Image (cartoon, helix red, strand yellow):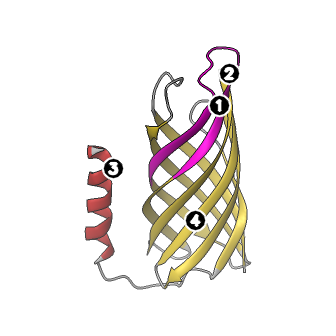
Amino acid sequence: MKILKTLTLIACFVSFSTTFGQDISEHALGLRLGDSDGFGAEISYQKSISRYNRVEFDLGWRDHKDYNAFKLAGVYQWVQPLDGNFNWYYGVGGGFGNVDFENITDDDGVFIFGAGDIGVEYNFDIPLLISLDFRPEIGLLGYDGFSDNFDFDIALGIRYQF
């Protein structure tokens, strides 16, 4: 919980900084691919809230050697311009999902997690956005069968903007 509180505090302080540059798109829809300890694929949707803030929702599936899971994540993000068409972003959120262990334990079921997010994205001159982000996730409830309730989720995203 201390990590999550620290990430939230940092995000709040940085969000008060003044930013200049390009606006983020109203909507973006695409895929977010990757995971730290297996393969994950997510359908990803981003919706702008203001000029430099947005929410991202990801519905995905995880394939690990010990379990399969699906999850829904939601992250509030602050977007800051870097140079040209590059932006960096950070955020905080969480989600829930369902896990099915591969005959290891009978602890299958629902789990809830908190998440941070930091990444970089490139906004092409066509309506295409590509990103690389790091989303640490910490298990809050329902992580009895997991060997570790902390996950380093690293993913590549590609989204169509509209």
Rate crowding at label 1 as few (under 14), some (14 to 19) or many (20 or more) other CA atoms within 10 Å: some
Determine whether the residue tagged by mark 1 lies in a helix, strand or loop.
loop
Callouts 1 and 2 close, C-beta under 8 Å = yes
Determine whether the residue tagged by mark 2 lies in a helix, strand or loop.
loop
Give the residue at mark 1.
Answer: 38
Give the residue at mark 4.
Answer: 56
Which badge, 1 or 2, comes first in the chain's sequence? 1
Amino acid carrying mark 1 in the image = Gly
Mark 1 or 4: the one toward you: 4
Residue 57, by quadrant, is bottom right
* Residue bounds of the magenta highlight: 95-116
Which badge, 1 or 4, comes first in the chain's sequence? 1
The residue located at (56%, 64%) in the rendering is 121
Between 97 and 28, the one lying in front of the other is 97
Left or right relative to 22: residue 26:
right
Residue 4 is labelled as 3
Residue 90 is labelled as none
Determine whether the residue tagged by mark 3 lies in a helix, strand or loop.
helix
- Magenta stretch containing residue 99, yes or no? yes
Mark 1 or 3: the one toward you: 3
Give the residue at mark 2.
Answer: 65
Query: CA separation, marks 1 and 4?
Result: 22 Å
Amino acid carrying mark 2 in the image = Lys
